[in-house]
């Protein structure tokens, strides 16, 4: 990548290694007014600025469809400024913020618009926003659609947020019916509340409150029961369904079978399910607590097989931080669940495949960008390094191994399940719409310049 020309045009050159879902392509990129206007080994546009990246891979900007930045109302947990900065440091160019941890939650148009207003002021990357689906807000869904919601999110178990209650089967069915008429996708946190309560009570009755007891309280059956119910309702209503943070190969298999039978459903998993196992949860403690919980090593490896087989459509961070005081209880059940992984989770996935990049980087170009943009109907602008698309990309290269250090973190609270983990990957630059956002360890676009992204209808 040898030139960026602003404001009239730019050229990115020197026979770059540009990653596409179909393979790694040798090409230069011509950029004009934030869009890719030319792809060739010999760009004709005259450039004014140059960035040498001949030893890098150029990857489509990561679209993280699952983050909790918690603003307004809980910015002390993370916040749109710090969260988007950490995303950019990890190669992300667009995020979809979940509706529940802000206060008030984004379950009506007014709350949604306020969150958008703040994000436009504070985010250094582009963004979309989820609306919420909860009991009693069916009449609010059209307003969320009109305000530009990327989709609707529902919890099939307790969310932990009083103002964002769990949805029951009847309300989920009716919500899916309404969402189908409105052209809205529904995403669900799929865990069965009754089963989780049953297994949790059994552990507490034995006086067990440690990490192993928590893992035992949410076995894979808790996830599978909820996935089955969500798939049945989606098939019945014709709703477009997205199962977030699928933690098990068995869950992926249920989604794959439903897709084969015509259900409009996609599966998301997260970096932590591909990088960590249950022994890591016991070793790391609070930073590795999440729901559904991290599974055993055979299931972790099987998830990689499902990913490479094309059975997992998207990967999102599920970045869900909390203040340190909420992560310190000796009772593991009382610790706030959520892994802060938006900055290093994707990098460590690339690191896992450092010896097979030619094979695996195209896979990541699909599940971290193209597939996300397609599923959520923003692919007219986002998701691919192609003519007419936004020039969203990150640069990465292999380097000497380093340990991830606390001083690298851009999140509000410097805690991560990945501290101390070794990585050979360096994400050196992130560009949004042709402009540098993050470069060589620093933010470069303050004040913020993120744009709100609406799905096509």
Image (tube, rainbow, N blue to C red):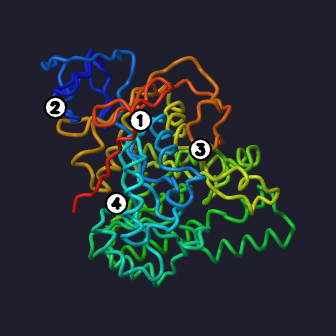
Q: CA distance from mark 2 to mark 1?
A: 26 Å
**Which residue position is annotated with label 4?**
150
Q: Between label 4 and label 3, give the one nearer the viewer.
A: 3
Please report the residue visible at 69 percent of the width from the left and 74 percent of the height from the top: 197
- The residue at which mark 1 appears reads as 446
Q: Residues within 10 Å of mark 4 (few under 14, many from 20)?
A: many
Q: Estimate the spatial distance between the alpha carbons at disc 4 and disc 1, rounded to whole Å.
A: 26 Å
**Which quadrant of the structure image shows residue 125?**
top left
Viewer-closest of 72 and 164:
72
- Contact between marks 2 and 3 (CB within 8 A): the answer is no
Looking at marks 4 and 1 on the same chain, the residue that comes earlier in the sequence is marked by: 4
- The residue sitting at 35% across, 50% down in the picture is 372
Quarter of the image that includes the C terminus = bottom left
Instruction: Measure the C-alpha gap from mark 2 to mark 4.
Output: 27 Å
Q: What secondary structure is marked by label 1?
A: loop
Q: CA distance from mark 4 to mark 3?
A: 26 Å
Q: Which mark is residue 412?
A: 3
Q: CA distance from mark 3 to mark 1?
A: 17 Å
Foreground pick, 68 / 370: 68
Residue 37 - label: 2
The reply to whether residue 311 is visible in this rendering is no
Image point (40%, 62%), residue name: 114
Q: Residues within 10 Å of mark 3 (few under 14, many from 20)?
A: many
């Amino acid at each position: 990548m040898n030139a960026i020309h602003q404001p009239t045009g730019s050229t990115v050159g020197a026979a770059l290694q540009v990653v596409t879902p179909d393979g790694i392509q040798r090409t230069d990129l011509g950029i004009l007014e934030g869009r890719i206007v030319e792809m060739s080994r010999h760009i004709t546009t005259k450039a004014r600025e140059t960035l040498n990246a001949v030893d890098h891979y150029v990857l489509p900007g990561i679209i993280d469809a699952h983050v909790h930045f918690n603003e307004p109302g809980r910015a002390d947990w993370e916040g749109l400024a710090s969260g988007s900065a950490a995303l950019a440091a990890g190669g992300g160019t667009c995020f979809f913020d979940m509706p529940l941890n802000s206060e008030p939650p984004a379950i009506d148009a007014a709350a949604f618009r306020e969150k958008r207003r703040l994000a436009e002021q504070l985010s250094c990357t582009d963004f979309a926003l989820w609306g919420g689906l909860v009991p009693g807000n069916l009449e609010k869904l059209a307003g969320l659609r009109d305000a530009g919601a990327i989709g609707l999110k529902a919890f099939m178990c307790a969310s932990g947020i009083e103002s964002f209650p769990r949805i029951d089967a009847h309300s989920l069915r009716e919500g899916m019916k309404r969402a189908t008429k409105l052209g809205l996708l529904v995403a669900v946190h799929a865990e069965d509340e009754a089963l989780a309560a049953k297994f949790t009570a059994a552990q507490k009755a034995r006086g067990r409150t440690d990490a192993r007891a928590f893992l035992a309280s949410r076995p894979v059956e808790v996830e599978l029961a909820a996935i089955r119910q969500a798939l049945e309702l989606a098939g019945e209503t014709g709703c477009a369904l997205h199962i977030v943070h699928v933690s098990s190969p068995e869950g992926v298999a249920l989604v794959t079978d439903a897709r084969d039978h015509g259900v409009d459903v996609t599966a998301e998993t997260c970096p932590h399910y591909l990088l960590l196992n249950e022994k890591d949860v016991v070793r790391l403690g609070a930073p590795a607590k999440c729901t559904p919980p991290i599974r055993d090593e055979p299931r972790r490896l099987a998830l990689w097989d499902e990913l490479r087989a094309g059975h997992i459509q998207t990967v999102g961070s599920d970045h869900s931080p909390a203040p340190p005081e909420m992560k310190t209880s000796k009772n593991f059940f009382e610790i706030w669940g959520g892994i802060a992984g938006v900055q290093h989770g994707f990098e460590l996935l690339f690191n896992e495949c450092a010896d097979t990049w030619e094979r695996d980087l195209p896979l990541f170009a699909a599940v971290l960008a193209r597939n996300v943009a397609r599923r959520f109907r923003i692919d007219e602008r986002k998701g691919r390094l192609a003519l007419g698309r936004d020039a969203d990309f990150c640069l990465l290269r292999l380097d000497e191994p380093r340990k991830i250090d606390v001083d690298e973190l851009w999140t509000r609270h410097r805690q991560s399940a990945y501290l101390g983990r070794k990585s050979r990957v360096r994400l050196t630059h992130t560009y949004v719409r042709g402009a540098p956002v993050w470069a060589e360890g620093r933010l470069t676009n303050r004040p913020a310049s993120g744009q709100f992204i609406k799905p096509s209808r």
